[in-house]
């Protein structure tokens, strides 16, 4: 219950404050991803899932953002990739730069999402597999929070999935241009 209340508060803050009241700072995206995956290492080990991170960019990728909310978004995405993965599964996170955008791709070997559910994954309280709710926990607010965070940072998110094969989530965020 506490998790639901906390998630609703986060969503409310993002919705009400929007971009204007969210404090932003320069963030090294590679370091942020590493910090987030380190925090989830125990959960991944418990679920017998391996996480791999590959920075495909030769240069540092910096963006202007709110570290707290970006970590929250990445945590929700990677946690879903862990929880809905198979025993012995993999999660591969790629970071690359494409023009003036940072692309983060999170690819898992998990159970996947049916196409009929993909259109609803960002709806508040929507659960793809209600029968797993007790096993996996969760409130159905994780992906709506992710979407709000990405929008506040002027980014986009795309999910592709195939049942029994896995899911690919790509987040695109504007890179900070040095003055």
Image (spheres, grey):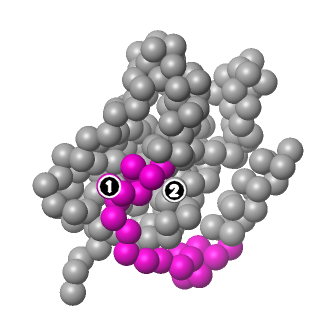
Within 10 angstroms of label 1, few (less than 14), some, or many (20 or more) residues?
Answer: many
Left or right: 65 in relation to 105: right
- State the separation of the CA atoms marked 1 and 2: 12 Å
Residue furthest to the right in view is 1
Q: In this rendering, does residue 118 appear at all?
A: no
* Residue at 69% from the left image edge and 31% from the top image edge: 127
Residue 110 location (% of width, % of height): 47, 20
Left or right: 103 in relation to 151: left
Classify residue 76 by image quadrant. top right
Q: Is residue 25 magenta?
A: yes
Q: Which residues are magenta?
A: 16-36
Classify residue 175 by image quadrant. bottom left
Residue 70 location (% of width, % of height): 49, 59
Label 1 with label 2: CB-CB less than 8 Å: no
* Residue at 84% from the left image edge and 49% from the top image edge: 2
Camera-side residue: 125 or 62?
62
Q: In this rendering, does residue 2 appear at all?
A: yes
Left or right: 97 in relation to 90: left
* Residue at 53% from the left image edge and 45% from the top image edge: 39
Dot 1 or dot 2: first in sequence order is 1
Q: In the rendered view, tell whether residue 27 sits above or below residue 167.
A: below
Residue 71 location (% of width, % of height): 51, 56
Secondary structure beneath dot 2 equals helix
* Residue at 56% from the left image edge and 22% from the top image edge: 47
Q: Which residue in the protein does label 2 denote?
A: 71
Left or right: 125 in relation to 146: right
Q: In the rendered view, tell whether residue 175 sits above or below residue 143.
A: below
Quarter of the image where the C terminus is located: bottom left
Residue 151 location (% of width, % of height): 49, 62
Q: Which residue in the protein does label 1 denote?
A: 30
Quarter of the image where the N terminus is located: top right
């Amino acid at each position: 219950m506490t998790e639901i209340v906390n998630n609703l508060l986060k969503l409310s803050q993002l919705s009400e404050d929007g971009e204007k009241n969210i404090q932003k700072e320069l963030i090294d995206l590679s370091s942020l991803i590493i910090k987030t995956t380190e925090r989830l290492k125990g959960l991944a080990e418990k679920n017998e899932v391996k996480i791999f991170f590959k920075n495909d960019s030769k240069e540092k990728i910096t963006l202007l953002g709110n570290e707290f909310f970006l970590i929250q978004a990445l945590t929700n995405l990677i946690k879903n990739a862990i929880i809905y993965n198979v025993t012995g599964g993999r999660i591969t996170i790629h970071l690359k730069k494409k023009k003036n955008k940072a692309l983060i791709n999170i690819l898992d070997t998990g159970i996947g999402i049916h196409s009929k559910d993909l259109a609803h994954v960002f709806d508040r309280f929507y659960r793809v597999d209600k029968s797993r709710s007790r096993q996996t926990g969760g409130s159905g607010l994780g992906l709506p929070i992710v979407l709000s965070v990405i929008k506040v940072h002027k980014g986009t998110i795309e999910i592709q999935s195939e049942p029994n094969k896995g899911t690919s989530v790509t987040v695109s965020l504007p890179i900070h241009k040095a003055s």
